[in-house]
Image (cartoon, grey):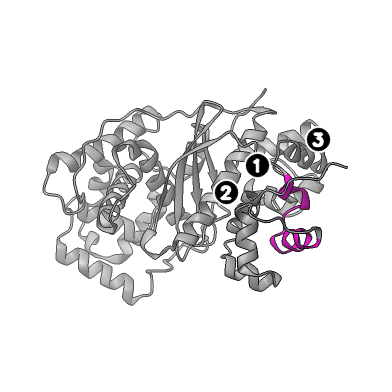
Amino acid sequence: MIEKKFYGERLRSARMYRGLTLTELAKRTEISKQSLSLYENDNNTPDYMKVRLLASELNFPYDYFFQKDSYAAKTETTYFRSLASATKKDRTAQSIKLEYVAKMYEILMEFISFPEMNLPSVDFVGCDDVFECENEDAIQEIEDIAAQVRKYCDIGTGPIKDLQYLLEKNGIIVSTRFTNGKKIDAYSQIENINDKIIAVIILGDDKENAFRRNFSAAHELGHLLLDDFYDIEGMSKVEYKEMEDTMNRFAGALLVPEEVYRTDLQTNAKTELNFYIQMKKKYGVSAAALIVRARQLEEITTNQYQYLMKQLSQKGYRTCEPYDKETKQMQPRYLKEAMKMIIEEDKITGTEFLKVVSENGTSISEEIVENILNLDEGYLMMNDSSGEVVALERR
């Protein structure tokens, strides 16, 4: 009988996926922190019962720990929102989860021919702080890039109520199941899978706020377009904030076009909070973002901007504005509909698909696959009705 080799990197990956430190996992399993560290670094091998215990606690299949990772994707820089409040553990856990999204995409590529990533090529010089920057050319640059994206995607000057669909239509993978909204709002990453460049955007699912999610999607699109112009390694917190301010400016310019919005702002009501609350239904972004945009365009003064923001705080709208809860939040459909095509049309069962995943060197649980693909709990073991889909082709 050939003894299987235990791979410590798999234990580390599973632990990080669950967002656990060595100390936390040691406490849950009563396996010492020192032993766990030895296992992860392949300096010792756990016995059968310990692997069973670890697999049960982390909710990963037993075989997962004995498979060498055949993952072909190469990961580029990851850009996180709310970096200052997120710990290294938080960011690492999210990066591991994003890698699983790319792994699942790689497996689905065996069945489905996905659209190529389709984004315009842009030139960008930028400045230190777009909101306060005195360089009018740098400010106009962001406005021009946003207009270029709209023209490239042929969306005119109207509102973009469902930016997620537009991103998926242009070959960008969007998922929503992973982030902790208190620390990380969203993040994006470029992956190279078998020489095919793909982009992945992860949007926070816990906030249940369609307006903020739309803005986050636009923010992350900014990173995908402009990330080549930033060197995130060694970037200070101040520099990171300046970069995030630039992406926020791009998001505002994309979702709230200057020419159209200036027309809306030709009213005395622009100094009243209710005006922006009503405008959010038109533009699909929060009242707070619309107030910021009005100030950026110098349609309101600094004092008027501060007054409106103070009103937001006093009414408790910083965390939840009117229309937030009753507005339906769109869900990504790209990977989900690909999985539905495989199961419902090709009649491949959930068990058979999990076997394919395992054969690719990534035995993971039904729960993880459903989470990655935005599927309902238990879907892999039952059929589900199809919804509006992004056009996919058979491979």
- The location of residue 55, given as percent across then percent down, is 74, 58
Q: Is residue 20 visible?
A: yes
Which badge, 2 or 1, comes first in the chain's sequence?
2
* Mark linked to residue 336: 1
Q: Amino acid at mark 1?
A: Lys
Q: Nearer the viewer, mark 3 or mark 2?
A: 3
- Cβ–Cβ under 8 Å for marks 3 and 2: no
- Residue at 45% across / 57% down in the picture? 185
Query: Looking at the rendering, in which quadrant would you find the N terminus?
Result: top right
Q: Nearer the viewer, mark 2 or mark 1?
A: 1
Which badge, 3 or 2, comes first in the chain's sequence?
2
Q: Residue furthest bottom?
A: 314
* Mark linked to residue 331: 2
- Residue at 69% across / 43% down in the picture? 362
Q: Secondary structure at mark 2?
A: loop
- The location of residue 125, given as percent across then percent down, is 21, 37
Q: Disc 3 to disc 2, how far (Cα)?
A: 24 Å
Left or right, 32 with respect to 351, comes to: left
Q: Amino acid at mark 2?
A: Gln
Q: Nearer the viewer, mark 3 or mark 1?
A: 3
- Disc 1 residue crowd, few under 14, some 14–19, many 20+, Cα 10 Å: many
Q: Disc 2 to disc 1, how far (Cα)?
A: 10 Å
Residues in magenta?
A: 49-66
Query: Looking at the rendering, in which quadrant would you find the C terminus?
Result: top right
Q: Residue furthest right?
A: 1
Front residue of 260 and 23:
23
